[in-house]
Image (spheres, rainbow, N blue to C red):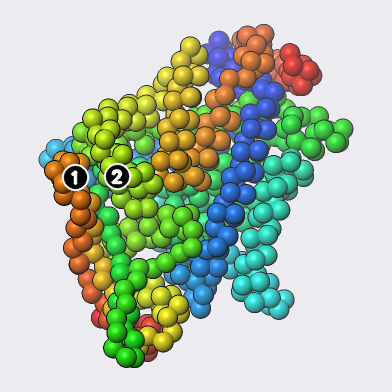
């Protein structure tokens, strides 16, 4: 029974929902960055065979083979074409729609419908982009997927401020944050483990290569050479940081240190390798998942080990006290 | 929270995390099988055995039109968890490059890689070129390069023929750079000749 209570406490901690505000604002910024950074190449990346670099039909076909139920841009562009819009105009509609949705997400207006529409459009772009998509797109989809199933509204959203709606169930909010936390742990564990299996991460070769091959060679190569002695140290540090993240992040005295270190790593990737979208989405996910919420820690202490039969009562109590700051 | 929704959430959490772990293990088994890791003397047979459980559970051993496989593909794509997280791992291997030689009616030649207009576009183009470099299917590689040649031809419609050079690029190692060798080594692996008709209709040699 005690083990059951502990599991319940772990999986359903009462949360104020500020983490969800963090996630929403971060992903809103991410979507805005995504459309603005691809503005000049939008038609080239998502255009069909006449105007695209590769042709959207490649990504669409690859997606269709996996499953016909996965959203792709053809679902949006075909009806718009039937309505009389040419492909460029239809792609412009998608671009503007994502821009507006990103802005609404940033403000927290119509949270769930906006999250759903943004997820759908971003996923359609990522799938139709096919071979022109990369890790940042997947991680953005992950973040948006958690947003659409999250208990809305979050405390900092305009939906919450303007309307009389209470914030979502604190225990449901805590559960969704826990899912994101566990997902991040799996991401870093496998990323770290795979890196540890490559010799180049232990002798600095991979760091050197990562930072000197185009288009990641943002820093001049002679700068990199001048700090060559640091390359093996940097490689080993990255391996160990990623591999131990799933364990150390749960240890409260080290949580902030690990969080700052991993965010610094992603900031470095964004600035030194020019992978801004990848860096911002990882920092957003990390801060949303693990930024210490003082109110939450206190609530966990207050609600320690409630009997299983009192879950509902505790949820209601937590819901009442959480918005007030406990 | 009612007991029903409590158990629904627990069940979903378990399946969701299990799928993430299985996809990652499947990717890792592939890397081990291709002998891209430092694990010594691992045969492809062993890696197939290692991949037996994750591969089976995520349906990669099933026919591509299997309903269970399609359902899993749908969910993993919708959740963004269809691929693993081995970025720049286990090693940062040689990179690839594609350059087109443009032939004009007066016989003069120009050289140009596929072009995009932004750094973000460049990151995506790099991802594409690397995937072309990794593919083991010649027809697939031909088709992708033909499409990139066609895109280049649209920017230079007065060209009469395009030749594509695809190969690997090895940057200088740290030691080589320190000893004054700064050049990147391009090794051409494939050459493709495209005429206007081929670009329009498909093909290339």
Q: Nearer the viewer, residue B40 or B16?
A: B40
What residue do we see at 46% from left, 19% from top?
A257
What residue do we see at 42% from left, 32% from top?
A265
Local secondary structure at mark 2 = helix
Count residues near mark 1 (Cα–Cα under 10 Å), then give few for <14, some for 14-19, many for 20+: some
Task: State the mark number for residue A77.
Answer: none
What residue do we see at 37% from left, 53% from top?
A215
The correct choice, above or below, for A235 with respect to B144 in the image is: above
The alpha-carbon separation of the residues under discs 1 and 2 comes to: 9 Å
For the C terminus of chain B, the quadrant is bottom left
Left or right, A66 with respect to A221, comes to right
Tell me where residue B12 appears, x and y as whole percent. Answer: 56, 37
Count residues near mark 2 (Cα–Cα under 10 Å), then give few for <14, some for 14-19, many for 20+: some
Local secondary structure at mark 1 = helix
Question: Which quadrant of the view contains residue B105?
Answer: bottom left
Left or right, B33 with respect to B179, comes to right
Q: Which residue is mark 1?
A: B177
Tell me where residue B102 appears, x and y as whole percent. Answer: 33, 80
Question: Which quadrant of the view contains residue A2?
Answer: top right
Dot 1 and dot 2 residues touching (CB under 8 Å)? yes
Q: Residue furthest right?
A: A164
Q: Which residue is mark 2?
A: A221
For the N terminus of chain B, the quadrant is top right
Tell me where residue A277 appears, x and y as whole percent. Answer: 51, 46
């Amino acid at each position: 029974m005690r083990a059951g209570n502990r599991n319940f406490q772990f999986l359903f901690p009462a949360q104020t929902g500020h983490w969800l505000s963090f996630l929403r604002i971060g992903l809103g910024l991410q979507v805005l960055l995504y459309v603005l950074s691809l503005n000049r190449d939008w038609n080239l990346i998502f255009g069909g065979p006449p105007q695209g670099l590769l042709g959207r039909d490649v990504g669409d076909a690859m997606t269709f083979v996996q499953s016909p139920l996965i959203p792709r841009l053809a679902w949006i562009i075909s009806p718009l074409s039937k309505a009389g819009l040419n492909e460029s105009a239809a792609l412009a509609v998608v671009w503007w729609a994502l821009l507006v949705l990103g802005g609404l997400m940033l403000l927290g207006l119509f949270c769930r419908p906006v999250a759903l529409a943004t997820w759908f459009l971003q996923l359609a772009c990522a799938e139709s982009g096919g071979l022109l998509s990369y890790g940042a797109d997947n991680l953005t989809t992950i973040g948006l997927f958690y947003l659409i199933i999250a208990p809305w509204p979050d405390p900092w959203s305009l939906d919450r401020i303007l309307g009389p709606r209470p914030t979502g169930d604190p225990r449901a909010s805590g559960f969704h944050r826990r899912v994101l936390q566990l997902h991040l742990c799996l991401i870093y564990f496998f990323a770290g483990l795979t890196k540890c299996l490559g010799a180049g991460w232990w002798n600095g070769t991979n760091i050197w290569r990562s930072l000197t091959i185009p288009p990641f060679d943002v820093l001049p190569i002679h700068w990199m050479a001048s700090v060559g002695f640091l390359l093996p140290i940097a490689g080993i540090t990255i391996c160990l940081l990623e591999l131990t993240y799933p364990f150390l992040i749960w240890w409260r005295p080290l949580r902030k240190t690990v969080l700052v270190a991993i965010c610094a790593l992603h900031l470095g990737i964004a600035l030194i390798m020019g992978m801004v979208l990848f860096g911002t989405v990882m920092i957003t996910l990390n801060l949303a998942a693990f930024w210490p919420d003082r109110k939450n820690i206190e609530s966990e202490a207050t609600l320690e080990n409630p009997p299983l039969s009192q879950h509902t009562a505790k949820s209601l109590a937590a819901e009442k006290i959480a918005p007030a700051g406990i | 929270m009612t007991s029903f929704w409590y158990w629904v959430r627990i069940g979903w959490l378990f399946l969701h995390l299990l799928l993430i772990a299985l996809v990652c293990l499947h990717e890792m088994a592939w890397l081990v099988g291709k002998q891209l890791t430092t694990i010594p003397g691992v045969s492809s047979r062993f890696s197939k055995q290692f991949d037996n459980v994750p591969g089976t559970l995520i349906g990669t051993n099933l026919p591509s039109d299997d309903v269970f496989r399609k359902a899993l593909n749908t969910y993993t794509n919708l959740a963004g968890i269809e691929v693993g997280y081995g970025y720049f791992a286990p090693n940062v291997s040689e990179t690839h490059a594609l350059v087109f030689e443009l032939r004009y009616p007066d016989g003069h030649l120009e050289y140009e890689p596929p072009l995009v207009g932004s750094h973000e576009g460049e990151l995506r183009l790099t991802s594409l070129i690397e995937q072309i470099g990794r593919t083991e299917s010649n027809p697939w590689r031909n088709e992708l390069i033909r499409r990139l040649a066609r895109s280049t031809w649209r920017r230079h419609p007065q060209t009469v023929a395009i030749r594509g050079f695809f190969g690997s690029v090895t940057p200088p190692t740290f030691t080589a750079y320190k000893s004054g060798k700064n050049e990147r080594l391009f090794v051409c692996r494939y050459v493709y000749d495209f005429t206007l008709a081929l670009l329009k209709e498909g093909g290339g040699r």
